[in-house]
Image (cartoon, rainbow, N blue to C red):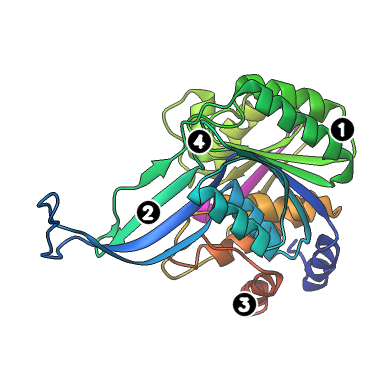
Amino acid sequence: MPITRSEIEEIFRKISTLRVGVIGDFAVDFYYDIHYKSQEFSVETGKEVFWASKPHSSLGAAGNVVNNLKALGIEQIQVFGCVGNDIYGREMMSLFHKIGVNTQNLKILNNNWDTCTYTKPMSDEGEANRIDFGTHNQLDETVFGDLLDSLGNAIDTLDVLIINQQFPNPLLNPQRIEQLNQLISKSSACLFVSDLRAYGYCIKNTILKVNTEEMARLLGISNIDEADENACIEHGKNLQTQIGDSLIVTRGEHGILYLDKEETQNVKAVPIRQEIDTVGAGDTVVAAFSASRGTGASIRQSLQIANLAAAVTVQKLRQTGTASPDEILHIYQATFNS
């Protein structure tokens, strides 16, 4: 049964008062256009100079989850993580402050930490070779201990905590996730949703979101066809049994699955007949589901709102998009009342 417009509007009214935390891998996405055939040569090196233009930045990785939460109308957002005292770190702080995010627990590190940055040159042929900063940082354990203490002090003030892991050498490795699990086990009033690219098998007592590629990796199999609903359900049940917690499986243009010990729910994707760009759609699903569920909405209502939100963002080409309540209601109207 499709969610009704009045139900969506009621959930959005409640969303604005949520208190949400995000812990994990925060990054800056730095874009610029690049032109390789300048016919200008450096006096110092004799090498051809590349021309660049239109530099702009946005929040990436866990920061994109924050962007999506803010687009939904959530006012009270806290971030828990690390940033370097460098040019990209200052840019990240500026981007957070511009949208009113509480960065009190974003630790600024003066030594041995480069702010995680995805530098993306855009040529006529599309995105060229990316240059990454900070994705292999080594975090001192005392810094993580301080960060976990800060989260422990704040946890009772949060309605929702979203847990993110994206980088090859992340803030949350298996040993640190075990420490986080101990904190989660003592916090019954908060909703926990996790999106861990490599370490989903480590987290406990959360709703874990995976895509089919991540699910296959966690199960140790080569491939799961996201278009094959029966295969996704079968493998999803296997993974859910192994982790013992609830599971969300995103299936791209085929929709979203939810599995727990009692039930399996499947929400079909909104049909889209134009070019799409799926970059960041998983972050949109995590943010929209977490926010909706955090208001007390049912699992099915939360999945449907997440599905609608993802349908908004995938139509925003060559950008890491977000979905506002008005945009979600517009695509709902076009889908169910056309």
Q: Position of residue 90 (x, y in %)?
A: 56, 52
Left or right, residue 309 beside residue 53: right
Q: Name which residue type carries label 1.
A: Ser
Q: Is the residue marked by circle 1 packed among few (<14), some (14-19), or many (20+) residues within 10 Å?
A: few
Callout 3: helix, strand or loop? Answer: helix
Helix, strand or loop at label 4? It is loop
Q: Position of residue 313 (x, y in %)?
A: 55, 63
In the picture, which quadrant includes the C terminus? Answer: bottom right
For label 4, the residue is: 167
Residue pointed to by mark 3: 334
The Cα–Cα distance between marks 3 and 4, rounded to whole angstroms, is 37 Å
- Residue 262 vs residue 278: left or right? right
Say which amino acid is labelled 2: Lys
Q: How far apart are the two marked residues, 1 and 2, measured between alpha carbons?
A: 39 Å
Query: What amino acid is labelled 4 in the image?
Result: Phe
Residue drawn at point x = 71 percent, y = 64 percent: 72
Q: Quadrant of the N terminus?
A: bottom right
CA–CA distance between discs 1 and 4?
27 Å
Closer to the observer: label 3 or label 4?
Answer: 4
The residue beneath circle 1 is 187
